[in-house]
Image: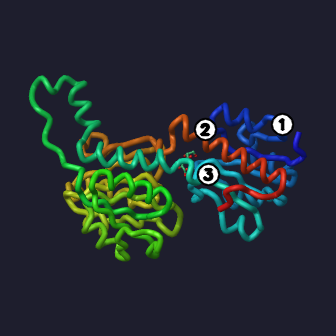
Amino acid sequence: MSAVRIVHVGPLTERFNQRLLQGRDVVQLWQQADALGYLAEHGAQFEVLVTSARFGCSAALLECLPNLRAICSFGVGYDAIAVEVARQRGIAISTTPDVLNDCVADLAMGLVIDTARQLPAADRFVREGRWLAGHYPLTRKVSGKRLGIVGLGRIGKDIARRAEGFAMPVRYHNRRADPSSDYGYEADLLALARWADFLVLACPGGAATHHLIDAAVLEALGPQGILINISRGSVVDQPALVAALLAGTLGGAGLDVFEAEPRVPEALFSLPNVVLLPHVGSGTEETRLQMEELVLANLQAFIDNGELLTPL
Ligand code: 8YV
């Protein structure tokens, strides 16, 4: 049994919860009737915290853990982790980058096609017997259309590579141009939205990108434009998005993430040009297993030699 005490803040799969327990001194915080009361009494014992992109780690939680040295998170997003507070205290943070790029990029392209060709609505049309009464309306072509990417990071680049297979010209918007990329850089997000047929959001969440996609960007994308979001719901001004879709001033939206997950605006449920997914970007057996392995490998490396494998 390792001497390092670990606090596990939110349940993942039962398999992961059990693997984490093997040979380690782990307290599952969600099993405590009064988690904050428990931490007020015992918080000083913990050196490592295990969490996920969803559960994160707030500044208030960090305050209860005066001797914490590392946070190992399941997921690549860290917008729910109080990163600045952790940095100031010298707490190391690991996430699970790269292992989920394929699945998230696959899902982004899936949403591009599903939304433009209205596959879920066409499927409902067949299941409800409506084909017997007439043809499904025409939809929009994907191949050769212009794809704008907001956030050309690791996942954004994998989306761009896939889009090339569909002969789609790609341009991107980042805070700064990426010298390692040959794709066209657009410093002005509105100009990218005006140019794009599809605007795909692959940037991190958090304060720096909060409501980056506002009513003006949606208007620039326009009645033929389609918004795809596989990053974070907070990047989009969701009421503005709903209003644009209901008014028909935006052509469609394929969304895997929402501002107040798992709550999704019901006004979108009946729109055939909107595809709604329950945050499943990385949600395949293969990828989730690799994410698990990487969390455990980070944890073990930290316990063994004080170093994380994939630090932020
Ligand atoms: C999470 C995610 O893994 O990686 C991320 O940032 O959003 C997902 O892949 C999932 O929500 C579990 O926390």
Q: Which residue is mark 3?
A: 96
What's the residue type where badge 3 is placed? Thr
Left or right, 284 with respect to 303, comes to left
Q: Secondary structure at mark 3?
A: loop
* Residue 160 pos. (x, y %): 38, 58
Mark 1 nearby-residue class (10 Å; few <14, some 14–19, many ≥20): few
Q: Residue furthest left?
A: 134
- Mark 2: C-beta under 8 Å from nearest atom of ligand 1: no
Specify which label sits upstream in the sequence, 1 or 3.
Answer: 1
Mark 2 nearby-residue class (10 Å; few <14, some 14–19, many ≥20): some
Q: Is residue 164 above or below residue 119?
A: below
Residue plotted at (61% across, 44% down): 291
Give whichever of 21, 208 is nearer the camera: 21
Quarter holding the N terminus is top right
Q: Which residue is mark 2?
A: 289
Give whichever of 266, 81 is nearer the camera: 81
Q: Which residue is mark 1?
A: 23
Give the CA separation, mark 2 to mark 3. 11 Å
Whether residue 43 appears in this view of the structure is: no
* Residue 3 pos. (x, y %): 90, 46
What's the residue type where badge 1 is placed? Gly
Residue plotted at (9% across, 29% down): 134
Mark 3 nearby-residue class (10 Å; few <14, some 14–19, many ≥20): many
